[in-house]
Image (tube, grey):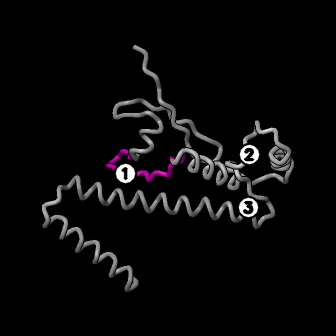
Amino acid sequence: MTDYKKYALGQLENFLYDAMSAEATPQEIYDTIRGVVSDNYYTYKHQASQAYELLSLLNGHRSVDLDFCDKDDTTEECVKSWSDFWTTTSYTEEEIDAMCAAATSAKMGKVNKWVLPVEEDGDDCVITFPDDLLEAANLKEGDQIEWIPQDNGSYLLKKVEVKN
């Protein structure tokens, strides 16, 4: 174990002892840890999106400023921009995903893709959905969902409407 890793884990242990000694509730400790992990995840997700966009530029694709021109804008510059965009060389799936993620987060401030760990609980597998996913999917505890496999190995989740 590296010295820094050992130091960082020791600091985490000390902070947990301090929080528990300060009479922080288990929920407060949990919320704090989860918040830090969530912030870290979204920071790296954003950085990965930026890296894909830069890689796209380095591969010879031009940047697309989605806030600059709307597809319905009839000014000469915007018509040319949209035309150029659709007639340039094809983009990789990663480049398209990065552009869509950048556009979505820029316009809505929310993430629309999640990578969730699968945890084992005895013979069962458990996935904990983060609050922002539940909100985006309009899900609550007890809702039924359908898992739809995608060609890339991911799953699309769809809320099952239960008819009474």
* Residue identified by numbered label 1: 120
> Label 2's element?
loop
Q: Residue at x 60, y 50 (%)?
A: 101
Label 2: how many residues lie within 10 Å, few (<14), some (14-19) or many (20+)?
Answer: some
Number of callouts: 3
Q: Residue at x 29, y 72 (%)?
A: 12
> Is disc 1 in contact with disc 3, using a CB cutoff of under 8 Å?
no
For badge 3, the amino acid type reads Ser
Indicate the position of residue 127 as horizontal and vertical percent values. 40, 46
Magenta range is: 110-129
* Residue identified by numbered label 3: 56
* Residue identified by numbered label 2: 69
Residue 127 shows in the view: no
Q: Main secondary structure of the magenta part?
A: loop
Residue 118 among those drawn in magenta: yes
In front: label 3 or label 2: 2
Residue 118 shows in the view: yes
Q: Residue at x 65, y 43 (%)?
A: 151
Indicate the position of residue 14 as horizontal and vertical percent values. 22, 74
Indicate the position of residue 115 as horizontal and vertical percent values. 50, 52
In front: label 1 or label 2: 2
Label 1, label 3: how far apart the Cα atoms are: 38 Å
Farthest residue, direction bottom = 3
Label 1: how many residues lie within 10 Å, few (<14), some (14-19) or many (20+)?
Answer: few
